[in-house]
Image (cartoon, grey):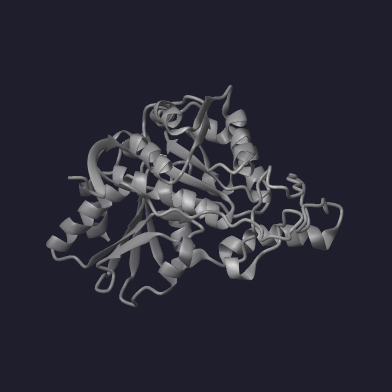
Amino acid sequence: METDVRARVLHGNEACAEGALLAGCRFFAGYPITPATEIAEVMAQRLPLLGGVCIQMEDELASVASLIGASWGGQKPMTATSGPGFTLMQEGIGYANLTQTPCVVINVMRGGPATGQPTISAQQDVYQARYGCHGDYENIVLTPSSAQEALDLTIRAFNLAERYLTPVIVLSDEIVGHTRERVLIPAKAEVFERKPPPKGHAYNTFEPIAENRGVPYRAKFGDGHALLVDGQVHDIRGTRVGHLIEPSADCVNRILKKIRDNIEDISDYSAEFVDDADFLVVAYGSTARSAKRAVLDARSAGLGVGFIQLRTLFPFPEFLFKNLPSRVRKIIVPEMNAGKICREVQHAACMQVMSLPKLGGDLHTPGEIFQAVRGG
């Protein structure tokens, strides 16, 4: 008998690909790179069978540029890469931000900088995902901690990209990407479709629509609209205004406001044992797995410890930390980097925040995090 959900054993990279297909992705362009190549391999196998297109591009610059064209052609496009390739994609991601082009970029993080550690995990790209482009903009950045979350958050990434007409970055990592575990795959996913301009609009508009959460309508090439997609700042009709102060500022404010005004809708997290906590552990990605085990062990030992797992890193959910119970006096943030998201937590929480960094590609053990909690 058929069921609505089937279980498969997948690793995180395969789960990302399955999530993309469920979300309606029918265009993939990428360049092979460790540890993300399996995503391209699955898409190359599956997309032709679904009437889609998978292209191995000459490099990562061409990969992200092709997403922009595909998106304006009406597709839900995706690429996948790791640190060095992600660096090359930054100009294209900035262009997609300004032109309000929905697309999804998977970055399966590895150790850096430069060639770094091609086969080893890290969480060193979190600020690059937020601040890698020049100018002012707001990227949406999601981060899974398991193969199941890799599937679920890839679907969510496409929905957010279409909802807010913006690039969405999924920051996976080598551990999540290559951990094989049970994944529940729905027969059909709930998907959001971008809203086309109503009849009577002769041109594509970048005008924020109040009833659409401040997001413009989106036409596509071939629909009979006059389209101007330009990397220079523009007015609501797409006309260049880079030589004019107020219209230029208005253009940038539009792409900021549609994200900043909807932070609570975009944010995804889980909070456990917070109400009776003296200490909090805040983690994301593969590190969240060790952190959750450490918190459970600490509570079994009688310690008042709570746990927050961030699945949306940016826009950073400051509201989570501005309304913590008064008894919480310290926050511990384990990360596989030199200490990055701990700064965001410190800024939002206005209390003692302890960074627990780890470099070299070795995941925190639950025992290491437990000792940090007990020593606090």
Q: How many marks?
A: 0
In the rendered image, the residue lying farthest to the right is 243
**Quadrant for the C terminus in the image:** bottom left
**Residue 1 vs residue 118, the one in the foreground:** 1
Q: Residue at x 49, y 37 (%)?
A: 26
Is 288 situated above or below 26? Answer: below
Residue 231 percent across, percent down from the top left: 74, 44
The quarter of the picture where residue 268 lies is bottom left
Q: Is residue 7 left or right of residue 55?
A: left
Q: In this rendering, would 45 be left or right of 9?
A: right
- At a point 21% along the width and 68% down the height, the residue shown is 304
The correct choice, above or below, for 10 with respect to 340 in the image is: above
Residue located at (62% from left, 29% from top): 62
Q: Residue furthest top?
A: 58
Q: Quadrant of the N terminus?
A: top left
Q: Answer left or right for 81 relative to 60.
A: left
Residue 337 seen in this snapshot: no
The residue lying at 45 percent from left, 41 percent from top is: 124
Tell me residue 40's x, y (percent). 44, 29
Q: Is residue 343 left or right of 324 when viewed as pictured?
A: right
Would you say residue 344 is visible in this rendering? yes
x, y (%) of residue 19? Answer: 38, 43
Residue 101 rendering spot, x and y as whole percentages: 62, 47
